[in-house]
Image (cartoon, coloured by chain):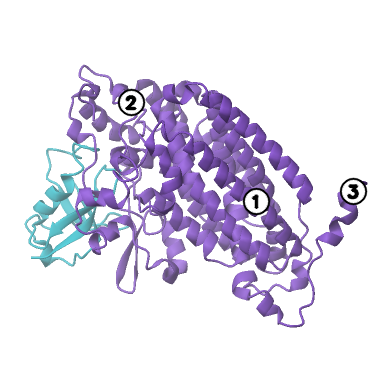
Chain colours: A purple, B cyan
Amino acid sequence: MTMLERSAWYDIARSTNWTPRFVSENELFPPEQSDPYGIPISEWETYDEPYKVSYREYVGVQREKDAGAYSVKAALLRSKYYEEVEQGYLSMLKFNYAASVPGEYAACFPEGRMARFSKAPSMRNLATFAILDELRHTQILLYFAHQLVTLDRQFDWAAEGLNSMNWVSMAGRHAMEDLLHSRDIVTTSVMLHLAFETGLTNVQMIGLSRDAANMGDYTFANLITSIQSDEARHAQIGTPLVEIMVRNGKKAEAQQAMDIGFWRIWRLFALVAGIPMDYWIPLEKRERSFKEYVDEFVVKQFERQLRDLGLEKPWYWEYFLGDVERHHHSQQGGIWSWRFTVWWNPDAAVGPAERAWLEKKYPGWNATYGKYWDVITDNAKHGRKEKTAAVGMPCVCNMCQITVANRGGKEWEARVFQSEHNGRRYNFCSPVCQWIFDLEPERYADFDTIVDRLYNGEIDPASPENLLKFMGIGVLSEGGRDARDFSWAGGERPLAAAAE
Amino acid sequence: MAKFAVLSRLQHDAHIRVVDIDSEFTMDEVAQACAAPAVGYQTSHPDPSKPLRIRLTTKDDSAAPFPRGMKVKETSMKHYECIDIFVE
């Protein structure tokens, strides 16, 4: 059968707006879902997607991607690769699988809302494909992680962690519900397609893919490369949308949405990507530092993309650049010290060679973070097992749900930022998390951090054992332990002798 | 006697910690409670030759320390008060 070229029919097929006669335009496209900014529908109809694809083409390409990824997985599972690879690397996989599945699944819903509520017919088309993208990502991640559950129960968090009350799961869910589930689709598109997918996914997907390939884990490398090829495509949904906003006098609104979305996702990505890249990937396998990836994909590329769209860098850009040097190092320390609260076995990875690498990549590391690890290393060397794990609770940010931490040592940069709302005190890790809360306190005021829940009676009794159970530790799987049983610490009496 | 939580910002520490204190505590007892989960675990005492003092956290770290024997109930501290634990 003779097929028409796509270009011969595409423009007709995408012109699917009509003049409603039985309901008003506002009933068909409720402003609170479709466009609270009041941009005329005729403007939305100028939306010109930067890539064009037919369903037949889409299915053909996606089938090839899936076939490639699944065939590599089958080959690797026949080997003993995952039984023999370093625990720190497995921790990267456990963390990334369990962090990515909820994110990919969450992204199906805003794409679905865009497919229904966008006033731009072409955007509705692209969002329909994007739903299929995100579903594929959810499925393939779940399937791959499930293959590893027999090796280690901690991999089951990829499936079970989605709804858990673990603090890490809550941090991810809080951001997804804020950015993807509870705003109109125009604002959500700026946050999802521009801030999240254009701004930050390259760091995780391309950077970690390179590290995984260096590790010989072609399954994970292929998997996330396959996902990123979709993300890079449908991230472009946001480009014409922002152009329409800017052209119609809504630059400030687009900018604010971008600033909020970028920061919220940054706080998570620095943990998911930054910690593995700079600590859990064995030194000889690291392609580059996290900071170097951020410099390439965010500081240079994304900044240029924002400028091309007529937007500015986020107002907190200088603070962000500083955060690239601080956030993931601070959280690596905290996660390792409170390792019994997470579902992976974090690698301290601060032996002499690793510290030299960290100092080279992050000048000043030894004088700040190094002091932190000096105390821990001394305890580890001298068999003081009870002192290598944290006691008590860290303060948790009421926005990002991540612990409030910063450079220690003489820099002493740890600081909490507080706001009061309706007589209640809220704690924030940074001026940016505080700014987001202060913009719309009612949106966030009722959500409680894991620490708040200890004091408001939700976790009752407020005992350490009950807190861990509340977070799914000892229920879904055991909690974390040091990935290398302290062999990194050296000394005459390594703690491995008295392993946890 | 009333218990509540303060946010402990111990000099040189990387973490802000949630520490339960009692309104009957003196400032020295508050310092002791705040140092207990941090010193020797992830940080060192900023200067073991000097006593730890308590002040309210401010943007420029300029608040005066409370007298060491002063009780919590004599201050304006309330739940989630952020305090510095430091040496002069």
Amino acid marked by disc 2: Arg
Q: Are marks 1 and 2 on the same chain?
A: yes
- Outermost residue on the right side: it is A2
Closer-to-camera residue (A62/A329)? A62
- In the rendered structure, the answer to whether residue A353 lies left or right of residue A321 reads left
Examine the rendered structure and indicate whether residue A110 appears above or below residue B17: below
Disc 3: CA contacts within 10 A as few (<14), some (14-19) or many (>=20): few
The disc, 3 or 2, on the residue closer to the chain's N-terminal end is: 3
Q: Is residue A138 visible?
A: yes
Dot 1: what SS? helix
Real-space CA distance between mark 3 and mark 2, rounded to the nearest whole angstrom: 58 Å
The quadrant the C terminus of chain A occupies is: top left
Dot 2: what SS? loop
Q: Chain of mark 3?
A: A
Real-space CA distance between mark 1 and mark 3, rounded to the nearest whole angstrom: 24 Å
Q: Chain of mark 2?
A: A
Instruction: Write down the residue under mark 2.
Output: A484
Q: Nearer the viewer, mark 1 or mark 2?
A: 1
Instruction: Write down the residue under mark 3.
Output: A5
Q: Which residue is found at the position 40% from the left and 29% from the top?
A: A88
Quadrant of res A85: top left
Q: Chain of mark 1?
A: A
Marks 1 & 2, CB-CB < 8 Å contact: no
The disc, 1 or 3, on the residue closer to the chain's N-terminal end is: 3
Q: Nearer the viewer, mark 3 or mark 2?
A: 3
The disc, 1 or 2, on the residue closer to the chain's N-terminal end is: 1
Real-space CA distance between mark 1 and mark 2, rounded to the nearest whole angstrom: 40 Å
Instruction: Write down the residue under mark 1.
Output: A132
Query: Residue A462 location, x and y as percent?
Result: 20, 56
